[in-house]
Every structure is written in C-alpha cells, then in structure tokens.
Image (tube, rainbow, N blue to C red):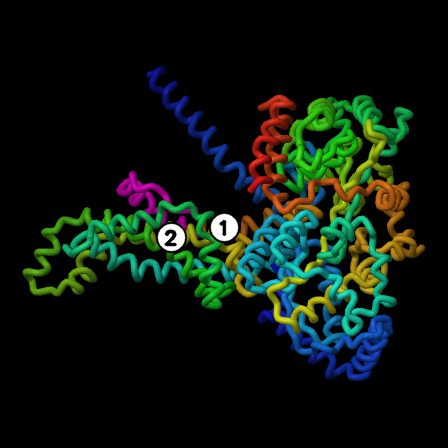
Amino acid sequence: MTAKRLRVFALLAISMIFLLAWAFPILWSVLNSLKTDSDVLAYPPKLVFAPTWEAYRDVLFGSGSILPNLLSSVIISVGTTIVTMLMAVPAAYALARLRFRGKKFAGFYVLATQMLPPVGIIIPYFLVLRNIGWIDTYQGIILIYLSFSLPFAIWLLVSYFEDIPFEMEEAAYLDGASRLKTLWRIIIPQVRGGIAVTVVFVFLNAWNEFLFAVVLSGNTVRPVTVAMFNFVSVEQTLWAKLAAVSVLAMLPVVVLGVVAQKHIVKGLTVGAVKGGGRR
Amino acid sequence: MPSFTPTRRTLLKTGTAAAAFATLGPAFLRQAAAQDADLAPYKSAQIDWQQVSGETITVAVIPASYFENLIALAPQFKALTGIDVRFEKIPPAQIRQKSVIDLTSKTGTYATHAADPMYYALYAANKWVEPLDTYLNDKTLTDQAWFKLDDIIPAWRSANGIDGKLYGMPYDGEVTIQVYRKDLYDAKGLKPADTLEAYMSNAAALNTPNERVWGAALRGVAGAGQNMYIYPSIFREFGGDWMKGGKLTVNGPEAEAALAWYVDIMKKYAPTAAANWNWPDIADAFSQGTVASYIDAHSSASVINNPEKSKVIGKVAYARWPRGPSGKRTTSIWNWGFPINSALPEKKRKATWLFIQWAASAETQARTAHKFAGPTKRSGVNRTSVWKDPEYIKLMNGFGENFVEATMGALQDDTDVDWRPRVPQWPAIGDTMATAIQSALSGQATIKAALDDAQRRIEPMMRG
C-alpha cells in the first residue's frame, strides 16, 4: 500500500516537473504580456502586479498593429491546409490502395522531398518565385508551403488508409458503389480521425513557419511570426509587446488544438511512429 | 509590422482625414502653404528635384526609431520630388540576408537598404552597388555646395568606402563609449577609466553581486555584430593588426592579450548571464541598476534614460573608451548607410540617389533629430554641423554628464577605419571569430587554442 502510494506520488512529482518546464514559458509570456515595461524588468520578478492591457492595445490598435499580419497568417494557413487536404487525401488513397506503375518510386519521392534541409532550398525558391513574380504574394507562399506540407500530409494519411480493412471496400463494391463513391462514403468517414490530425499538423506548421516566410514575404504578405520579430529592435526589446503578440499568435492554435483534441489523442496513438512535421 | 502600402485601415484613416479637410477647408489651405514653405531649404539646391517624378522605389530599413522618423517625413520627399518611396521594415539579422539575396539575383527589389558597413567590400567586389562619386559629381543630380559631403562624419564615410570610393551614404551611426553610474563611482571616489587596466580595477571595486550590482558588462552573445563588435576595439587597443604583412591574422600575442582581458572582465565582474547578452540586454540591466558600467554604443543612452523603465535617470555619466596598452582608444565606426543597387534601371537609380541625397542632407538630418515633432529624437545624426548646433547639443546633454563631449571626442579622435577587417569574406570571418570568442569565454577552449583555431579556419576563406 505505502509502496504503491509512494510510486504514484513519485510519478506525479516527476510529471509535475516536466509539466512545469513545458508550461513555464507560456505562463511567463502570459504574465509578461500583462505587465508594463518596468514591471517586466523588475527584480525579483513580480508575480503580483497591477495587470494592464496596454501591450495588447498597442499591438492590436497601435501604430504597429499586427492585425493585418494575423490576417495574413490566417489566409496562408487556411489556404495551405485546404489545398493540401484536397490533394493529399486522393493521393494517399491511391498510394494505399491502387496498383500502378512507379508506385514504389512515387512513395519514395514523396518521402525524399522531406529529406532536404529547408535552409538549403530557400534561395532556389526565392529565385523561382521572383521569376514568376510571386514574391510577397499569398499564392507564392502557399505554393512553397505545399512543397513540404503535401508530402507530410500524404505520408501521414497513407498509414491511416492502410489501416482500413479492404473487406469494407469490397462490401461497398458488391453493393454496386463506384470507387469514388466508396472513397467518399465508406473510407473517408473511417479516417476522420486521421484527417483531423493531419489538418491540425499542416495548419500548425504553416502557422508557425518563419524561415521561408521571412525571405519570401514582404510588405503585402507578412505573417505574424515575421512581424513579431520586429519587436526585437536594434534599440531595445519590447518585452511586453513581444509577449502580447506571442499570446495572440498562440490563441488560434490553442483553439484548434482544443477542438481537435479528441482526434489528436487518438491520432497520436495510432500514428505514434510517424514522427512530426517540418517546423 | 506596419506596412506602407495602403491597407484597408490606412485607407479608412485617409477617408476620415479627407472628410475632416472638407469641413476644415481654410485650415487645410494653411497646411498646404506650410508644406510649400517646408521645402524651401531643399529647393535652394541647384538641381531639378522633379527630374524623375513618378518613379516608385522600395527601401528596406530596420525597425528603429531613427528610421521611423525618416519614414514620417516621406510625404515631404514625395512633395519635393514626385517619387514614391515604399518602406519595408526588416529585422537586422534578416535585412543582410534579404539584401544579399536580392543583390546576387540582380532582381532590384530594394533600390537601397540600410546597409552594414562591413558588407561594402563584398558588394563592391561583385559590383552589386554603384560607386557614389558618379552621382556626387553629376551636376544635374547633386548640388555639392548645398549637399556638403565633407560635413558628413569622415569616419563613417571611410567606413563605407572601399579604395577611397564611397559606396554607401551614412544616414545614422554610433560610436562606442564608456557609460557609468556616476553615483556609484562618486561614492567610492572612482573616476571613469582612462586605461583598460583602470577599467578593470573600477569594475573590481564596484562588483558586489550580493547587492545585485556587477562591475561591468560587455556584449557576450556570439555574433559578427555582437561579441565581434566589442572585441575588435580591444584587439586594436592592444596593438592588434588584422592585416599583418598583408595576411589576415586573428591570432598572435596581441590578440591573446586582448581576448584574455575580455574574458577576464566578463568572468570576474559581469553577471554570468552576460555571456548571452547583446546590447539591449546590457542596457536593460544597467537601467535597472544592476550594472555599474558598460562600454557600448552611445545610442543606448536613450534606453537608459527612458522614464518608463529606467531607474538610473540622473545618475548616468559618460566617458570615452579607456586607452589600451598601445595608447589608442578605438571606437566602433558602425553606421547604417544607403548604397544604390546596380541592378536598377537608370531612372530608378537616379530616383534612389535623390532619396539618399535628401535623407543624408543636413536639413533632413535636423528634421529627424532635434526638429522632429515626435517623442524620440535621433542621437546618431551623420553631420558635424548638426552635432555643433546648440539646440541639438542641449537635447543630447539631457542624456547625462559629458555625453556630447564623450561622443564627439570619440567621433573625432577614436575612430579607426581598420576597427574590423574589411574584406569581402567578412560575413564568414565575423562568424568564425564570434564562435572563437565565445568558446574562450565559456572555457571550452583556452584563449590561445580558440584564436589559433579561428586562424586555421579563416586562412582557407581568404584563399578561396
């Protein structure tokens, strides 16, 4: 009894330590976003202080408002997610079920694009977009994001499709359903969880992307990850505002996470060996 | 961040403004007349400012108040020249990357950008930017008697020149000076250090970590513009020479002594965290009263005098760099300059030059500094004449005792064009040195080993 309780207690303590290590930066950001600049720098750090919405007011409605950047991020992330899913679902189904020439090669090719270090392909991408006049445009950034979100999504979805027993499809065919109808009516409802997980990961990667965005964006299209960086100026770091933007930029992701949580948990166990996306 | 192409919001704002003007007709007329008068100092230049009216150029700057002030005056430039300027704000780390990509691909996206003086060797070697003398000597483009190039701080011009040719027009710059807590120094009867040795002993005398006061702090974080911004001054003061016998040399006895001094003061008298600090962090710490002295850019004075967060206002004083064993004081010659992108068509190059001439002119420098209506005034103006303007001096003296004297003294006597090695390979060399300095500071390598290793890495870069 005591041994068991001790073990539970020890496990609990260890998980608390991990939880604290992971949650601390987020809690700290939230706290700092509610402080004035002088409170941010105070020592010892103030846990009790008069909270102010000033930083939020400034970053939302001040001269350096990030609202246009949040909008940019939404357009880019939603656009990337929709196009990715429209193409990834049929592609993944084909790779999982159909027999065609070059299938093995196609499967490998999808993976191969994941193997390049992103830093090495920024300049080629820049040149391509420059030549077709797509620098600083939504279609340009979404196109580039597709280059890594699509392989990732296909790869993730293939395993979900493969998990579905072939007999279910056969039953549908026997009842006279076409292949497309089967895909739509039988298969897709079965992989709902997998699709939800993929959507979340694709959206997250697009939302948090910085490396490509900073080079390929400009004044017209500037996602929040890039805009946020301007609060670290050469003159000073505006800690409170930086924290406020971080919290605001975190919100949509947190909301999406909570909504899709049920599926994510299931998806994580199902696809436990599949690894994460490219950040 | 804010964009300067009209967004829906700014359009809405303009709409409201237009409505306001409609009801306040007479006031609007007065305003328009005032704007005419505003341009008079520029119109006295014997050139046709309107010669490429209708052009649009994009200018990349970093997010900083000294560029914000310039952006605020852009409508005046438009009224003067008919040229539209689109500003794009890019953080300092990325502006180098983006402008180099733009220049190598010859796409001409940025007509000009806020350029790092250490990059001109690279730019000029590849003919990516224009030598400015062509523009300066063209009587249709420049009225030399009006522009007065000689008035622009000589050290910054030489920093932006290669083989005597100017490639980037200095817009805003800085020198490094000693910043110290006069109250703490006075309490112990200390004087600002005249030598590096005295700087070390001052730091020792004031270092009381138990009371959360550390003796000194210098940039510790690794980076070509971070620890490799402060170390070169020490290296030069110890008598170091980057080009020994025509060969780039970063090791040797002077280098070892310089790095030893740096590591010593950082380890003994700076907060441990300072190993990861850049200058905003140093200024933040100083403003909270935890650092007794630092050596860094004079422009940091505005942060430590910011009433919203500083606790040391009125207790700050300034002095020039302490002398090194060679007897020299060596300041940074950092400045943000504007080059002209060679990939542009001729008309746009002319438009860019007119913009540069306008931005660097004495009038615009004054209008973005003491004559600026907004709250932040610039402390890095590019002209000796402005630095001698009593109005400007009065404003600058608000930063604390001896500020103007220390800054001007450093500008006149402590500058050194060979502060850092000006070679096209600088970006890679700067990073290599930054890593070496950090590994010595963190104790991963001995001082000699760190420097010798850097030398080994740098040699093939110079051959290639």
Label 2 element class: helix
- Can you identify the residue that label 1 sits on? A211
Q: Position of residue B414 (x, y in %)?
A: 84, 40
Q: Position of residue A271 (x, y in %)?
A: 28, 42
Q: Say if residue B342 shows up in the picture.
A: yes
The residue lying toward the viewer, choosing from A112 and B236, is: B236
- The amino acid marked with disc number 1 is Leu
The residue lying toward the viewer, choosing from A188 and B138, is: B138
Please say if B299 is above or below B16: above
Neighbour tally class for label 2: few under 14, some 14-19, many 20 plus, Cα within 10 Å: many
Q: Say if residue A36 shows up in the picture.
A: no
Tag count in the figure? 2
Identify which residue is drawn at 60% across, 33% down.
B435
Quadrant (top left, top right, bottom left, bottom right) of the C terminus of chain B: top right
Q: Is the magenta region chiefly helix, strand or loop?
A: helix
Label 1 element class: helix
Query: In the rendered view, does A7 fall on the left or right side of B60?
Result: left
Neighbour tally class for label 1: few under 14, some 14-19, many 20 plus, Cα within 10 Å: some
Q: Which mark is residue A148?
A: 2
Quadrant (top left, top right, bottom left, bottom right) of the N terminus of chain B: bottom right
First along the sequence among labels 1 and 2: 2
Q: Position of residue A56 (x, y in %)?
A: 61, 54
User: Which stretch is magenta?
Assistant: A255-279
| Labels 1 and 2 within one chain | yes
A158 is within the stretch colored magenta: no
Identify which residue is drawn at 67% across, 68% down.
B349
